[in-house]
Amino acid sequence: MTGRERDIAGATGRVDWVDTAKGLCIIFVVMMHSTLGVEKSAGTEGWMGLVVEFARPFRMPDFFMISGLFLALVIDRPWRRYLDRKVVHFAYFYVLWLTIQFVVKAPPMAAETGWGSVFSEYLLAYVQPFGTLWFIYMLPVMFVITKVLHDRGVPWQLVLVLAAVLQIAPISTGSVLIDEFCSRYVYFYAGYIFATQAFTLADWARRHMTAGIAGLLAWGIVNGVLVFNGLADLPLVSLALGTAGALAVIVTSALLTQAGASAPLAYCGRNSIVIYLAFFFPMAVTRVVLLKTGIIPDIGTISVIVTAAGVIAPLVLLWMIERTGYGWFLFRRPGWARLERDPPRRPVAQAAE
């Protein structure tokens, strides 16, 4: 085990700032879908659109970087166990929630294009990731590719450079799988390779809160200037902003944790997959109700409420499941969907899953 791996493995239980960072990321994701959905349905923009635009360069890069942080702990596992945790795990939830989403959306889709088209779209979703579920479709691909490269001894420096080239290159094939992989893999791999540095940065921020806040202010100004002047998508600029934004989220999470103000975000982070899988329905229902009734005229405020519904409702559903014992399969893999049983083991740092 390398020094980097020993440093990561030294953490036991959950890592507070990592959970907080995941919480920030999942809220930004729900916020984006909620705000854009409200603005599209209303035919006008609101002030929340500015927040979504500001977060666009780093919203998904940070999610992928966090997802790679703990990979060093498991990448040397036998392939069967690795595939169970890193492929079958996500495949189960993808198939389950893809089916749930189609059951909900099928009637209006069939009314427009017919049931044959709905069935075709459902099958296509196993090749072309569907809607909001593309993230958990993409992660297993990245996990497998990274282990193959690791097992074959490909130098990490070469992989990182090639991943950066893919991100910088204007690749647009129309395939969600190919395009998002090219755009996001560099952040996932950087999280894996530079995990120790990420933990060091978080520790530094906790010890130097004033300097950390000053750094965040400087980053925020630069990010805002580039975003709102239409420069954020330029080659190299996009990569720089994605990396800087991911680091900013790490610093922010460390500062919030140190200040004792991270509990709600950390709770969202610990249950990020619950929110990610289930936010689409309460988000859509709340949007329709608020826009139809017109009881709130401000589009930005509607976007905030819709975002809150998308975050809170899945957590309420999880609470109900835990209290009643019914519906646990929605967020927990049953035994038949495993390649092997989990052996008893001492707690280790939790990955961003």
Image: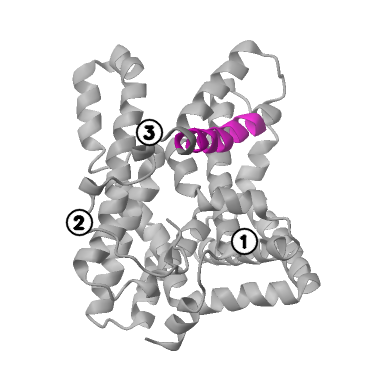
Is 247 on the left-hand or right-hand side of 133? right
Displayed quadrant of residue 31: top right
Crowd rating for badge 2 (residues with CA inside 10 Å; few <14, some 14–19, many 20+)? some
**Residue receiving disc 2:** 339
Instruction: Sort mark 1 into few (<14), some (14-19) or many (20+) by Cα contacts within 10 Å.
Output: many
Do the numbered discs 1 and 3 sit on residues whose CB atoms are within 8 Å? no
Left/right placement of residue 266 relative to residue 186 reads right
- Which residue is label 3 attached to? 327
Q: Is residue 311 within the magenta segment?
A: yes
Q: Looking at the image, is 165 positioned above or below residue 308? A: below
Q: Choose mark 1 or mark 2, whichever is in front.
A: 2
Residue picked out by circle 1: 249
What residue appears at the point 55 percent right and 78 percent down from the top-left corner?
Answer: 197
Distance (Cα) linking label 1 and label 3: 33 Å
Q: Is residue 56 visible?
A: no
Distance in Å between CA atoms under marks 1 and 2: 35 Å
- Judged from the image, the secondary structure of the residue bearing numbered disc 2 is loop
Distance from disc 2 to disc 3, alpha carbons, whole Å, reads 22 Å
Instruction: Please give the range of residues in magenta.
Output: 303-321
Residue 301 vs 54, above or below: the answer is: above
Q: Main secondary structure of the magenta part?
A: helix
Confirm or deny contact between disc 2 and disc 3 (CB under 8 A): no
On the image, the x and y values in percent for residue 60 come to: 49, 54
Depicted 266 relative to depicted 65: above or below:
above
Residue in the foreground of this view, choosing between 105 and 128: 105
Colouring scheme applied when the structure was drawn: one colour
Q: Amino acid at mark 3?
A: Gly
Give residue 187's position: percent from left, percent from top.
45, 65
x and y percentages locating residue 37 in the rendered image: 53, 30
